[in-house]
Image (cartoon, coloured by chain):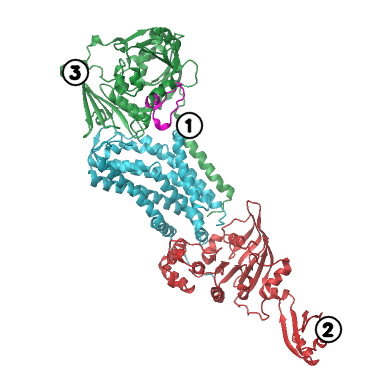
Amino acid sequence: MSLAEAPAQSTAAAYWRLQRSELRLVLGRRRNLVLLLGLAAVPLLLGLVLFFTQDTALDGQGPAFLGRVTGNGLFLVVASVFLCLPFLLPLTIGIASGDAIAGEASAGTLRYLLTVPVGRTRLLLVKAVGALAFAAAAVASIAVVGLIAGAALFGVHDVTLLSGDTVSLGAGALRVLAVVVYVGLSLTGLVAVGLFFSTLTEVPVGAMAATVVVAIVSGVLDTIPALSAIHPALLTHHWLDFAEFLRIEPDWGVIGGGLAVQAAWVAIFGALAWSRFTTADVTS
Amino acid sequence: MTAPATVVPAVTSPVTAGTAVRTQGLTKRFRSGQVAVDGIDLLVPRGAVYGFLGPNGSGKTTTIRMILGLVRPTSGQAWLLDSPNPADVLPRVGALVEGPGFHPYLTGRANLARLDAADQTSDARTADRRASEALERVGLLAAEGKPYRQYSLGMKQRLGLAAALLRRRDLLVLDEPTNGLDPQGTREVRLLIRELAQAGTTVLVSSHLLGEIEQVCTHIGIMSRGRLLLQGPRDVIDSRGVARVAVTVAPGHVATAAGVLRVLGLDVSIEELTLGAELGTLAPARIPEALVHAGVDVTGFEVRRPSLEQVFVELTGEGFDVAR
Amino acid sequence: MSNLSPRARWAVPAVVGVVVAAAFVAPPLVASASSDDLPTLTPQQLVTAVADAKDQPLSGTVVYTARLGLPSLPLGDMAGASPVNLLDGSSTMRVWTDGVDRSRASLLGATSEYSVVRDGSQAWTYSSTDDAVVHYALPAKDQARYDALAQDPTVEGDLPTPAAAATSVLGLVEQFSTVSLDAQSTVAGRDAYNLVVTPKSTTTLVGHVVISVDAKTSTPLRVQVWDRDSTAPALEVGFTDVRFATPSASVLSFSAPAGASTKDVTVPLPAATDRPAAGIPEGTTVTGTGWDTVVQASGVDVAGLLAGDTDALASVPGSQPAIGSKSGQKLLDEFGADGSGKVRDLDLGTLFDTITTKVPEGRLIETRLASVLVTDDGRVLVGAVPGATLQADAR
């Protein structure tokens, strides 16, 4: 009386069916949408503030790139990403990746997914892709709103690089796109860290907080000169290297180095998450 | 809790070769050092409705988690549908483990769709239809569009059952399926189990409330403190206990009745107008016959079989449901 | 899922960790492995080769590191004691040159840049932080003479490069130093000779200087200045990567970006005869020779400097553009504040009191390589000598 049905779909099709379900879950969840809207509000507010304070005493003050926004709306993208990088983006990543496994565990859905059955390696992969997709959506929402708001408020023009040289609008837009892509890829290491924490606990908030703390501690360690030997290996050390794309000749060694460090964090914490998740007793 | 003397006829179903669940020396020692499951040899024949009974904390859920591959045994082994690797056969197993677990912000139907999407062997084209059937079966079709968090405890439990019924299963593992259900809901679950069993599905159902499910079981296993105290077919378990007879007679007939019973070889105890005795091997029908023959005015006659709970108390010397 | 035991599964991240560590640690080790298969040279041959070498077209990254051993500073990171950071810390530059008269050097901030571009007789500096251009050009009357002479650049020496550092050291070689060769090594991925220059003087703070010279082009790749007793160079400037090829034309030219503030500076071409010897500007006096040289400047507005008034820098005789000009100051600001652009809430007076010690003549800063004495009567004495020597000179 075996009732086993013949596999109705290929392994790849089956994977994508679950992956689509996961993406719908992550990107359709109201809390996550609110997060994306919050991030999207940053360039909007920043653009409006700069728009109304230009030609006043406050004009040109503030962190890097801010002074360039009023001259070229494209820089609203860069300035917004730069402002979100130290805290808002890590917070968003922490919430998305820390929730990945721990959220299912705390809702009690993990045991049901595993008895469907979903292989643990497959589930971890699906969850990782989901968290990465959310990270990409977070960066993209800043960039897209930044571009629209920047273009509407200040117009877009040829881009003045950090070196003072000017490149055409097309080339400049490509460089700004590269900045956004680099920032997105820079967050992959933190996603892996969050995913690992997420496999350690049934309390999603704990994993989220731990992930954000890692990003903040990494940032703090990066400012301590006595630790300069370990700085290049820090998760956040190369985040600002996106500026390389705004120099006259981007140094691909620097860019590749930054991405290699992220890849290393992904490899190590991905492997840790895999070991933990595939050996853990699911008692939630 | 006293079970009536008459036994509800157990569901009869064709028992095929092979076992639905078998464990050998299955043991789980948690990192805290606590031994949750202590070397149990479970045997659930195919086609059975196996009542997996025991007080809260006796190790039933941990055993079920090991059987389903959620928890790694410290030692021993488990076979699910004769496979040592649960992942291979889990598509043929529906499970409800330690209460329902769903995403609170998704609707009942969306939750089912997600579980179905996770199933590599399920057919996406029939997903909607199967979800509808499962929802209808547990009486939840009307509430399918509501977010799970708005469900009552009973509705949540039903959705858990619906998830287990998303496709045809060879085995259903139902851990405390009546938790949170009102008497009506409990009765429905019993009916559902009986119906599924009649269709050929093996059911392993655990409970800490004996009376709720013992009526539908063909087999019983009783756990206490991590050990399997007793397991076997229902009638074998029943015959383990000693039946008692209670005879009530009209005033003035007590002494005569006692005499008759003693002649039959019973050890009589008297309480006002009622005479009680262990039945032993005596056929119950011979008692009223002998009494009437002796002219005793019998006003009541009852043979009491011990309830499972009484069996349990006899085995462990303690009450069944600690939490009750 | 395969049936690996938990122990085997936990071995996976351990293996990954080892592989990753190996991937990051091994290449630099391989790259810096010394090679002793270069032709043998005498130290003097090497000195001559460096002096005779043609300037090469190249592009690369230069890292400048100072470990001067200043007292630890009571600063939060955000306070941005920028000039101090440059004195004690690490900076990265990108350089491009065609080996003739066109070049670009960019000092890199995390999200900012200070560029010096020289294109023949013209030069520009550009600070990304305040979007400001300074354009240096010759007066019209000097242009023809420049074209004939292909004279030295107007703003040369703005940013330290290995070549500039090597030139100033080699100027002291013949009279005041002994030279020797150390084992060959690899610098910026290229085989290099290591020339060790040791001062004959025993009173200077400088212990020895190591100049790493590219074997193929005789271009200095790295200069390390060591004090008398330490395990790490007190000052180091060198390429971390270098390519000997003519950079693209776009890098070697500059035009002010739209919207930037632009300042034009006309710099008369000095006659070949009135260039001061050894670059000593007017208003200063020099005592001592060679490594023991002490430069004494008078009439410095110390109070103004401490108040953060950058214009007071103009009172420092012979101040270099990189330090003295407004654009240079902006650069320093940015480095300290890491791109935020302004030196904020920094009480320079307090800082000055912290890093200096009171002596009868005024206030003294002693570092591993040099000492600075600011006297109460407005003189500043600088030299690669112990503080006591400066105090004696100041009396």
Q: Residues within 10 Å of mark 1 (few under 14, many from 20)?
A: few
Q: Amino acid at mark 2?
A: Arg
Nearer-the-camera pick, A206 or C380: C380
Question: Disc 2 versus disc 1: distance between alpha carbons?
Answer: 95 Å
Name the residue that disc number 3 marks.
Answer: C147
Chain C shade: green
Name the residue that disc number 1 marks.
Answer: A227
The structure residue drawn at horizontal position 23% and vertical position 30%, both measured from the top left corner, is C261
Discs 1, 3 touching: Cβ within 8 Å: no
> In the rendering, at what x and y percent does residue A63 appear?
33, 37
Q: Which residues are magenta?
A: C66-90
> In the rendering, at what x and y percent does residue A243 appear?
34, 37
Q: Is residue A192 left or right of residue C127?
A: right
Please determine if labels 1 and 3 lie on a single subunit: no
Q: Quadrant of residue B52?
A: bottom right
Chain ID for red: B
Q: Is residue C60 left or right of residue B99?
A: left
Mark identifier at residue B262: 2
Label 2 marks a residue whose chain is: B
Chain A shade: cyan
The answer to whether residue C16 is visible is yes
